[in-house]
Image (cartoon, rainbow, N blue to C red):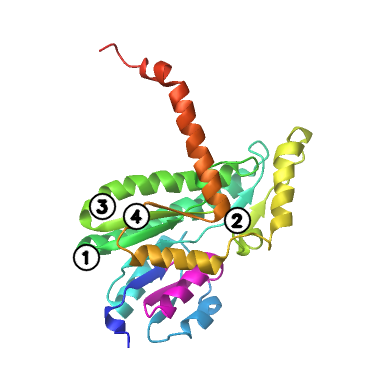
C-alpha cells in the first residue's frame, strides 16, 4: 500500500483538458498527490473523485496574481508543500505576422508566458526552502521550429525556452530541476477551445499562412500524438534519475527538431570564418 504522506505533491495548471488533465489522472494513478487546477474547479471534480484523499481541486487563473498566491497557499495548507510544478495552462493562436490582432497576441503572452512566470516565481520560495523540486514547463515544437501562421504562438514558446534555460542555470545548484516539454501535434483540445485565430485575407500569404491554417483545421481531432502517453512520458521523466532539460514528445516532433539542429549546425559551419572574424584581433 502506498504511504500517501510520503508521495510527491504535484501542482498542475490547466487541468480541465489535454496534458493537464492526463497528467493529473496519471499522477493520482501512481499513488501520488495532486493539486488539480482549473479556472472552474467543477471541470476537474471527476479527477479529484479518483482519489479524494490525495487530490485537491483549486480555482486558478494564471493571469491573476492574487489567485496564484491563493492556490499556492491552498496546496501548502492541504499537503504541506509542493514537489512538482507543471506550467501547462496556455493556448494557441494562428495568423500571419502582418494581420495579427495585437490585443489577442498580448492576451496570449499574458497566459502562455507571463502566467507561467507568475506561477513559477510563486513556487520557487518553497523549492528553495526544500532544496528540491522539479518544474515542467509545457512548451512546444513551435518553441524550436517556427512555421508560417504560428509566429506569435512560437514567440511565446521561444520565450518559455529561453526563460527555462536561464532558470535552470540559476536553480540547479539548489536541487531544483527544470524541464521544457516540447510536444508536436497531439490529440488535445488545442484545435478547439484552446485555439484562436485571425483569418488571413491577404492573397500574398494564401500559399503559406492560408495553407497551414487550413491544414491545422483539417487535422483537429486526428493528430498523431496520444495525450495519455505524453503524460506518462512526463511522469517517467520525473521518476527517473536522469532529469531531461528538454523532453521532445512525438515522432514528428523528434524529426523536426533533429532536422532543425542539423541544419543549424551546418549553417554555423558554413559561416564559421566570417562569424569568428567579428571579434577584435587577438
Magenta residues span 12-39
The local secondary structure at tag 1 comes to: helix
Q: Earlier in the sequence, mark 4 or mark 3?
A: 3
Mark drawn on residue 172: 3
The local secondary structure at tag 2 comes to: loop
| Residue lying at 38% horizontally and 62% vertically, measured from the top left | 237
Mark drawn on residue 6: none
Real-space Cα separation, disc 4 to disc 3, in angstroms: 8 Å
| Residue lying at 75% horizontally and 32% vertically, measured from the top left | 204
Q: Is residue 29 left or right of residue 81?
A: right
Q: Is residue 29 visible?
A: yes
Indicate yes or no whether the magenta region holds residue 15: yes
| Residue lying at 32% horizontally and 16% vertically, measured from the top left | 279
Identify the residue position indicated by label 4 in the image: 178
Image height check: is 51 above or below 12? below
Identify the residue position indicated by label 2 in the image: 185
Amino acid at each position: 500500500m502506498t504511504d500517501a504522506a510520503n508521495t510527491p505533491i504535484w501542482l498542475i495548471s490547466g487541468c480541465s483538458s489535454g496534458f493537464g488533465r492526463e497528467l493529473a489522472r496519471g499522477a493520482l494513478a501512481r499513488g501520488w498527490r495532486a493539486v488539480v487546477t482549473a479556472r472552474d474547479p467543477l471541470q476537474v471534480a471527476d479527477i479529484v473523485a479518483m482519489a479524494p484523499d490525495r487530490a485537491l481541486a483549486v480555482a486558478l487563473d494564471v493571469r491573476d496574481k492574487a489567485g496564484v498566491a491563493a492556490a499556492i497557499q491552498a496546496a501548502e495548507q492541504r499537503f504541506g508543500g509542493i514537489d512538482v510544478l507543471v506550467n501547462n495552462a496556455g493556448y494557441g493562436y494562428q495568423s500571419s505576422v502582418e494581420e495579427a490582432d495585437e490585443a489577442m497576441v498580448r492576451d496570449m503572452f499574458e497566459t502562455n508566458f507571463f502566467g507561467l512566470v507568475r506561477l513559477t516565481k510563486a513556487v520557487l520560495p518553497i523549492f528553495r526552502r526544500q532544496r528540491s523540486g522539479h518544474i515542467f514547463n509545457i512548451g512546444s515544437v513551435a518553441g524550436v521550429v517556427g512555421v508560417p501562421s504560428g509566429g506569435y504562438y512560437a514567440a511565446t514558446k521561444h520565450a518559455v525556452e529561453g526563460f527555462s534555460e536561464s532558470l535552470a542555470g540559476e536553480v540547479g545548484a539548489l536541487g531544483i530541476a527544470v524541464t521544457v516539454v516540447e510536444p508536436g501535434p497531439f490529440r488535445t483540445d488545442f484545435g478547439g477551445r484552446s485555439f484562436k485565430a485571425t483569418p488571413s485575407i491577404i492573397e500574398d500569404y494564401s500559399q503559406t499562412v492560408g495553407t497551414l491554417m487550413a491544414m491545422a483545421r483539417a487535422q483537429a481531432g486526428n493528430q498523431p500524438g496520444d495525450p495519455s502517453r505524453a503524460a506518462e512520458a512526463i511522469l517517467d521523466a520525473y521518476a527517473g534519475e536522469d532529469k531531461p532539460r528538454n523532453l521532445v514528445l512525438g515522432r514528428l516532433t523528434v524529426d523536426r527538431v533533429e532536422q532543425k539542429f542539423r541544419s543549424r549546425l551546418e549553417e554555423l559551419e558554413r559561416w564559421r570564418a566570417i562569424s569568428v572574424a567579428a571579434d577584435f584581433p587577438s
